[in-house]
Amino acid sequence: MKNPISYLTIIAAGFSLLAAQTTAAGEWVDLFDGKTLKGWKKSTLGSANYTVVDGAILGETVEGSPNTFLISEQEYGNFELEFEVKVHDKLNSGCQIRSREKTEEDLKNTGKGDKPARDLNRFHGPQVELEASPGQSAYIYGEATGRGWISTEPGDGAAHDFIKNGQWNKIRIVADGIRIQTFVNGNAVADLSDAAIYKTHPKGHIGLQVHGVKKNTGPFDVSWRNIRIKELD
């Protein structure tokens, strides 16, 4: 007869697993290893270039390309995200959160009036703006959602000089339920509570944007490094 498995052993194993899960919750995880693009994929639309140079992800514009995104393979809901960014003075960029590529169903919800949108596969959702100072970095835009600015301040012409042009800048984003808070170099920028965007985008991918550029402009570039995330309960 085989020895019966001790119930105490099973219970102890269960508590050990629970303890491990508890320890893992709230820990910082690196999203970029500083050497490769492992854990990331390029958006279906757009042809901008992404490479790793000197321990940073370098995104470079390609003339005639629409907005391009480097997308995290994993999806996230509630989290705290930190990274450093350096953006060309003439390039508009951004960091997408809780975003996804458009499905046929998304086309119905992002069109105008009774007409569905036509941008299938376009990466869309809340975007934390990134641009040179003085500007609107870290205010929140509804990329391809049909809403335009979600933060109210840009509509009033608000701008700040928290971004240090030509230098590395630290960005912090906290997304917890309907509330999204953003910070630039330790300065609070947006504090948004928007139930509507949370309803349509409660979770999704992180996306690093290289904005499309007009003909005969560029090349421009934007770089990211020290990207890490901490999921919230």
Image (spheres, grey):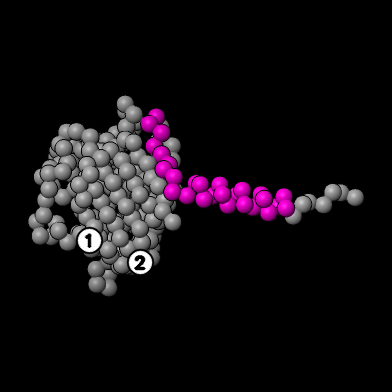
- Of residues 23 and 183, the one nearer the viewer is 23
Q: Chief secondary structure of the magenta span?
A: helix
Residue 41, compared with residue 175, is above or below; it is above
Going by the numbered disc 2, the residue's amino acid type is: Lys
Residue 120, given in percent of the width and then of the height, sits at 34, 57
Q: How many C-alpha atoms fall within 10 Å of the one at disc 1: few (<14), some, or many (≥20)?
A: many
Q: Is residue 14 magenta?
A: yes
- Residue at the spot 44% in from the left edge and 56% down from the top edge: 233
Residue 188, given in percent of the width and then of the height, sits at 21, 50
Q: Is residue 191 magenta?
A: no
Does residue 50 appear left or right of residue 165 in this picture?
right
Residue at the spot of label 2: 199
- Residue at the spot 34% in from the left edge and 29% down from the top edge: 55
Mark carried by residue 150 = 1
Quadrant housing residue 134:
top left
Residue 200, given in percent of the width and then of the height, sits at 35, 64
Give the mark nearer the N terminus: 2 vs 1: 1
CA gap between label 2 and label 1 equals 14 Å
- Of residues 66 and 182, the one nearer the viewer is 182
Q: Magenta segment range? A: 8-35
The secondary structure type at the circle numbered 1 is loop
- Of residues 138 and 110, the one nearer the viewer is 138
User: Does the image show residue 107?
Assistant: no
- Of residues 179 and 23, the one nearer the viewer is 23
The secondary structure type at the circle numbered 2 is helix
Does residue 104 appear left or right of residue 150 in this picture?
right
- Residue at the spot 14% in from the left edge and 57% down from the top edge: 154
- Residue at the spot 90% in from the left edge and 50% down from the top edge: 1
User: Does the image show residue 147?
Assistant: yes
Does residue 14 appear left or right of residue 211 in this picture?
right
